[in-house]
DNA sequence: AGTGTATCCTGCAGGC
DNA sequence: TGCCTGCAGGATACAC
């Protein structure tokens, strides 16, 4: 679930609540979520003050003072939940996540909880320059106006990989996952198995428009909840009912009524309308 | 350079 | 009710 719109939603919420708060205590429940020993992680973050929150691709960037970053990738089922300080009468048990992985107790009495059922997520600390090196490995942001249709086509031009695989590759373009790749290709009328290099100028224009449309509409709806995704305040995203292809195998295409088809390649399901998205 | 496969892990839906 | 299989938003590593 957590693709660009879901991550953006979480980031926007956290950006209104975390800055200025200090980490009072760190509890690591599942150390397989980290890339370093838990004691180093705890000691490195205790006393750190949140400065800002931002996003890069599908990564949540928590910026601290003194300068360092905590970069959170939600994997498949990760949640980053903010709990404001309690007042009398609250029942914390009702809102406690079922699969906490790391708990940050905040100076003001609130807490930030990373929860993750499958634990494919990752919490990594970086020095600022270390992160810059990682950042440089990611492709451009699809919503960045600096990315032009001509840029996209130039990047596509050199690759013979299927366009769906190309879109999922974070080093080529950052933030797109299986749901939004599926939806954008449907909107653009491009078959998921078409070679990236075979995409025409007109098609890459349509594709970029479709990518931006589906991502920004989903951000408006606070993302897509299939099962586990929640915003930082625990809400479900509302974009699921707007999906036109993803998960709709056998259902009629909303444009032409042809049954939506499911195919599998690259170890992932792809959904398409065989009529609106003619084969490679 | 690409692709197919496997891995990490848990939970749920569907078939029997 | 229970057991089994397949499948899931992601990232990465491997052999070919």
Image (cartoon, coloured by chain):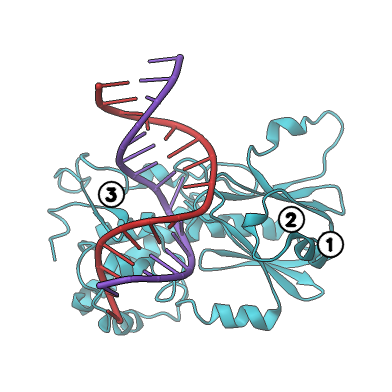
Chain colours: A cyan, B red, C purple
Q: Which mark is residue A113?
A: none
User: Callout 1: residue from which chain?
Assistant: A
Label 2: how many residues lie within 10 Å, few (<14), some (14-19) or many (20+)? Answer: some
Residue ID for mark 1: A46
Q: Quadrant of the C terminus of chain A?
A: bottom left
Front one among A93 and A27: A27
Q: Are marks 1 and 2 in contact (CB under 8 Å)?
A: no
Picture quadrant where residue A22 is located: bottom right
Residue ID for mark 2: A17
User: In front: mark 3 or mark 2?
Assistant: 3
Of mark 1 and mark 2, the one earlier in the sequence is 2
Residue A96 screen position, x and y as percent: 70, 37
User: Callout 2: residue from which chain?
Assistant: A
**Circles 3 and 1 on the same subunit:** yes
Total marks placed:
3
Element assignment for label 1: loop
Residue drawn at (55%, 58%) of the image: A7
User: In front: mark 3 or mark 1?
Assistant: 1
Looking at the image, residue A155 sits to the left or right of residue A95; the answer is left
């Amino acid at each position: 679930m957590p693709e660009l719109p879901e991550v953006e939603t979480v980031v926007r919420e956290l950006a209104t609540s975390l800055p200025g708060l200090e980490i009072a205590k760190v509890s690591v429940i599942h150390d397989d979520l980290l890339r370093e020993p838990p004691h180093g992680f705890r000691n490195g973050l205790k006393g750190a003050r949140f400065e800002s929150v931002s996003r890069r691709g599908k990564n949540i960037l928590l910026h601290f003072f003194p300068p360092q970053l905590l970069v959170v990738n939600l994997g498949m089922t990760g949640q980053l939940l903010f709990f404001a300080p309690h007042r009398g009468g609250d029942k914390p048990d009702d809102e406690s996540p079922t699969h906490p992985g790391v708990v940050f107790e905040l100076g003001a009495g609130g807490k930030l909880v990373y929860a993750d059922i499958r634990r494919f997520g990752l919490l990594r600390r970086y020095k600022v320059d270390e992160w810059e090196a990682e950042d440089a490995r990611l492709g451009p942001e699809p919503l960045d106006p600096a990315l032009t249709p001509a840029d996209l086509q130039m990047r596509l031009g050199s690759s013979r990989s299927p366009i769906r695989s190309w879109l999922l590759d974070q080093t080529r373009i950052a933030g797109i996952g299986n749901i939004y790749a599926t939806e954008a290709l449907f909107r653009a009328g491009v078959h998921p198995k078409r070679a990236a290099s075979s995409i025409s100028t007109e098609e890459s224009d349509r594709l970029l428009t479709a990518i931006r449309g589906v991502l920004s509409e989903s951000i408006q709806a606070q993302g897509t909840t299939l099962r586990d995704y929640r915003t930082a305040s625990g809400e479900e995203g509302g974009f699921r009912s707007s999906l036109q292809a993803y998960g709709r195998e056998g259902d009629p295409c909303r444009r032409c009524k042809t049954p939506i088809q499911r195919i599998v390649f690259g170890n992932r399901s792809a959904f398409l309308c065989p009529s609106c998205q003619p084969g490679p």
